[in-house]
Amino acid sequence: MVKPEKIIKSMGIATSGLAMSQAFGLPIDSYLASFSWSTPFFVLSGCSFILILLILILMPSIDNRQNIQNEKSVVQRYKLLFSNPKASKLFLAYLLFQTGNFASFNFLGTWLNDDYNFNVTQIGIAMLILGIGNFCGSFFGSGYVSKLGNAFTLFGGVTLMAVLYFSLPFYHNIVFVEITFFLMFFIAGVLFPLMMSLLQSLSTNARGTIAALSNSSMYIGATLSACIAGFLYHHFGDFTSVTTFTAIMFIFSLLVYKTSGILTPTKVSATASQKVVK
């Protein structure tokens, strides 16, 4: 529903809602789990029922202005989308990034328990810092992107995240760990709307299809990362192997982003510029 130039800001606002729920949901859930492991599930079920009612009452109907797009079959929609040569590389780069990101994220709680003897409540409080960082990055990130540019933000941000993840297991002070949590997920909050806007730029008529496929890519990455990181953690017995895998995935992701050409400015000829002015 938003204009192309507002996509990054709009995605940032939406993502900040996700980050805020993560920030408060984890410690609340940890507190509920201290009563019984089943208590969070009953509370979640009740909240979900309330949300269903709110969606039915408050969710506005969206006029469908893309009748031509909707008349196409699912196969035709994806075929049209991937007729753009940049599409496959962008989705692959996003998949690699999320695979690396979830590899470490999925085992942060396990690592805090193994290395710092944190209980469920303490892990939830530690994750609160992570969520606040993600919220701040998501909400204020569009300003940084507009100042630094898409290319510098993406390559600089992913590189810095790779360094921070790789160095995480070598800290012996929980204060440094929490600061790193905040920085990593602040950067992630800036990057996620940017990555989504790059995907959305592939087509103006298939934004819903792109959003659906990007979510599928993210959850495929989460599934793959859980399998791979679980094996690495069990086989090597430390978190370093997992964060190293994360850093490698980030590097591969950057290489694919680089070869996609999506961040290369398009040169416009003088004749074309005159036509645009006219």
Image: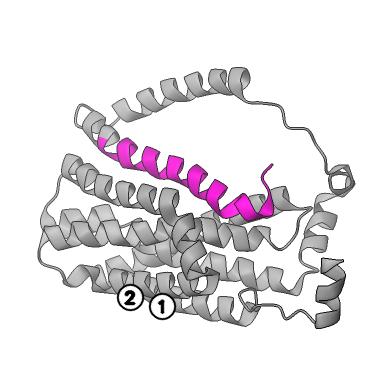
Q: Amino acid at mark 2?
A: Thr
Q: Quarter of the image holding residue 78? A: bottom right
Measure how far apart labels 2 and 1 are at the Cα level. Answer: 6 Å
Which residue is drawn at the image coordinates 61% and 82% (left, top)?
A: 259
**Element type at mark 1:** helix
Viewer-nearest residue: 153 or 122: 153
Q: Is residue 208 left or right of residue 221?
A: right
Q: Is residue 84 left or right of residue 39?
A: right
Residue 201, percent from left and from top = 68, 61
Boundaries of the magenta span:
1-27
Judge whether residue 96 can be spotted in this image: yes
Residue 248 — which label?
Answer: 1
Callout 2 touching callout 1 (CB < 8 Å): yes
**Element type at mark 2:** helix
Which residue is drawn at the image coordinates 47% and 69% (left, top)?
A: 148
Is 4 colored magenta in this rendering?
yes
Viewer-nearest residue: 61 or 147: 147
Q: Magenta: predominant secondary structure element?
A: helix
Residue with the mark numbered 2: 244
Is 238 colored magenta in this rendering?
no
